[in-house]
Image (spheres, rainbow, N blue to C red):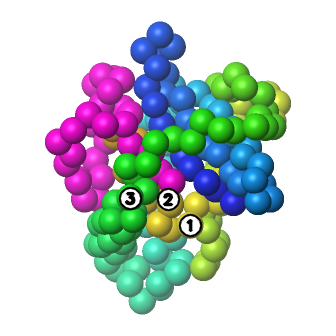
Amino acid sequence: MVLHQCQLTYIPEEDRIVMRASFMHGEDELHELRAWLTRRIVKLLWPTLQKAMQTQVTLDQPAASHAKAEMVNMTHQASVMELAAQGKFGKPYDMEATHYPLGETPFLVHNAQFNIARNSPMRIIFAPETGAGFEIAFTPQILHGFFSLMPTAVAQAEWDMELFLPSDDERDDETPRVLN
């Protein structure tokens, strides 16, 4: 399955962020996976995600390992600019999913496991305490798009957490961001 879109939206009634990831299966079947991200899991996920991105740079470009933070910054800026130029953040989330492999009700993410390998997409497994979770293979560009969605959702949650991006690309409007 190929990642179609990813969305992070704060739901005040739940005091959680719902992560929705949709995948194209075949040519016309849209599958969607849903999970709740709590303040606790975001607080654990964010620094791990930053470290994982730096580890990926070290694996993929060993000669640049001394400047891995700068490489992550440059890659992040370029990826977010390219996604924005392609209109990937402006397109509304596609609500036409026909299949929900884990059900329509989001599960509560208990942990996230990162799998990093040289010259391969970073894989993150989002898992509940018991039962089935899901894995997303993030290409570098999609990973940086996901990385840029999280601070917006956390700011809307007003969790008194600041998630610093390698490059903070300030947005003036309150339009929800979607990664397509």
Q: Tell me the CA gap for discs 1 and 3.
A: 18 Å
- Residue 77 at what x, y percent from top left? 29, 66
* CB under 8 Å between discs 2 and 1: yes
Image point (30%, 22%), residue name: 158
Image point (54%, 29%), residue name: 18
Res. 172 in view: yes
Residue named by callout 2: 143
Three-letter residue code for mark 1: Thr
Numbered marks: total: 3
Residue named by callout 1: 139
**Position of 58 relative to 145 (above/below):** below
- Residue 98 at what x, y percent from top left? 76, 37
Three-letter residue code for mark 3: Gly
Q: Tell me the CA gap for discs 2 and 3.
A: 16 Å
Looking at the rendered image, the quarter that the N terminus falls into is: bottom right
> Magenta stretch: residue 171 in it?
yes
Res. 135 in view: no
**Position of 79 relative to 118 (above/below):** above
Query: Magenta region, mostly helix, strand or loop?
Result: loop
Residue named by callout 3: 87
Image point (34%, 80%), residue name: 66
